[in-house]
Image: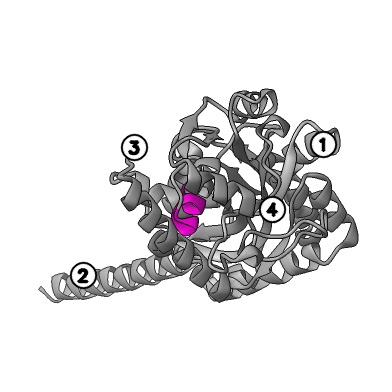
């Protein structure tokens, strides 16, 4: 009996020891499986390649600017930047994928005004809210547009254009690269602010629109600076004003529409770097620091100028406020046009 008692006592002791050892082992394993401390992850960033999504095909202005920026950002961060073209829906696909990504700094968006300031008013089924689902890091560049006319139109200035439009409402025509495009909205905003009646003629792309303005079939067009300037210099188009609220270093003698009596007029194509909502503030600060350094590089500024763009530096708070202002402005214009996708 005593031997049996001692047997169970020893068995209980062994069981208790094994259970304690198992508990200790489980706790140790759990500790080793814990995710890396967030602060540690931030201090080591970046440890792998970073994706920068672009909402347009290779070779276009968005893609060219993104690649120029990505090359220098890779040098600054000492890490690979992979440009991924997610073309379609005016940049909405890239913005949608960025909004759905993990906010860890490894997915960035090189976004532009179309998907971030215009699409929300055109597309009621847009799967993202630019102000809620994305983190603005830095505005980077803008691309001014030129108000150009056909030499055959006889229009000599902005004031002459407005006078003719008021004298013959609905007779003057303006082309666009498509309904809802920046070239279209720039014209609609001008029509509204100048209080004139123009006939909109949409085209499937900027090339056909520009050709018909040069031939005299259409009176006027709001064209990208880099595309229009060679044609202006060749005498095939007449340039009258810029759509920005300040003059461009590329054409410093050309006035802006805002300085010609319409101070509230501004219609630009802008570009910025964003991330998914919830990006940790230290990463926002780090990326912004490197982007500012890039924007201050004379070679980068020269390359932007060669593409008809220029540096447009805004910090995250300024970028967010500007985006909100642009959203509100185009919402009013689009509502007045009763335009939807």
Front: mark 3 or 2 = 3
Crowd class of label 4 (few under 14; some 14 to 19; many from 20; radius 10 Å):
many
Residue 211 magenta-drawn?
A: no
Location of residue 338 in the rendering, given as x and y in whole percent from the top left corner: 30, 45
Residue at point 48% right, 48% down? 166
Residue placed most toward the observer, 276 or 332: 332
Crowd class of label 1 (few under 14; some 14 to 19; many from 20; radius 10 Å):
few
Front: mark 4 or 3 = 4
Residue placed most toward the observer, 297 or 108: 297
Q: Which residue is mark 1?
A: 230
Q: Residue furthest right?
A: 299
Task: Estimate the spatial distance between the alpha carbons at disc 3 and disc 1, rounded to whole Å.
Answer: 33 Å
4 or 3: tag closer to the N-terminus: 4
2 or 4: tag closer to the N-terminus: 2
Q: Which residue is mark 3?
A: 341
Task: Estimate the spatial distance between the alpha carbons at disc 1 and disc 4, rounded to whole Å.
Answer: 15 Å
Residue stretch in magenta: 188-195
Q: Which residue is mark 4?
A: 241
Q: Are marks 3 and 1 in contact (CB under 8 Å)?
A: no
Is residue 58 visible in the rendered structure shown here?
A: yes
Residue placed most toward the observer, 3 or 303: 303
């Amino acid at each position: 009996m005593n031997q049996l008692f001692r047997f169970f006592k020893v068995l209980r002791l062994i069981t208790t020891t094994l259970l304690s050892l198992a508990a200790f082992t489980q706790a140790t394993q759990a500790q080793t499986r814990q995710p890396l401390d967030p602060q540690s992850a931030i201090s080591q960033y970046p440890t792998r390649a970073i994706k920068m999504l672009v909402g347009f095909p290779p070779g276009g202005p968005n893609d060219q600017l993104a690649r120029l920026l990505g090359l220098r950002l890779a040098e600054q961060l000492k890490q690979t930047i992979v440009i991924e073209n997610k073309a379609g829906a005016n940049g909405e696909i890239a913005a949608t994928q960025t909004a759905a990504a993990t906010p860890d700094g490894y997915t960035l968006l090189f976004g532009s005004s179309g998907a971030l300031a215009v699409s929300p008013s055109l597309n009621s089924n847009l799967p993202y809210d630019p102000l809620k689902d994305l983190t603005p890091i830095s505005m980077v560049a803008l691309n001014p547009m030129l108000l150009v006319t056909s030499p055959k139109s006889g229009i000599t200035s902005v004031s002459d254009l407005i006078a003719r439009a008021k004298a013959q409402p609905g007779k003057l025509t303006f082309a666009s690269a498509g309904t809802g495009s920046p070239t279209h909205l720039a014209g609609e905003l001008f029509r509204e602010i100048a209080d004139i009646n123009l006939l909109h003629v949409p085209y499937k792309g900027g090339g056909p629109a520009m050709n018909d303005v040069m031939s005299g079939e259409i009176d006027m067009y709001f064209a990208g600076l880099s595309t229009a300037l060679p044609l202006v210099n060749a005498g095939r188009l007449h340039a009258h004003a810029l759509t920005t609220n300040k003059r461009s270093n590329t054409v410093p003698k050309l006035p802006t529409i805002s300085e010609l009596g319409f101070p509230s007029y501004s219609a630009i194509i802008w570009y910025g770097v964003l991330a998914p909502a919830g990006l940790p503030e230290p990463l926002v600060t780090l990326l912004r620091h490197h982007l500012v350094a890039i924007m201050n590089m004379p070679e980068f500024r020269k390359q932007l100028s060669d593409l008809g763009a220029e540096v447009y530096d805004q910090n995250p708070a300024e970028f967010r406020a500007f985006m909100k202002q642009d959203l509100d402005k185009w919402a009013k214009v689009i509502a007045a046009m009763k335009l939807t996708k």
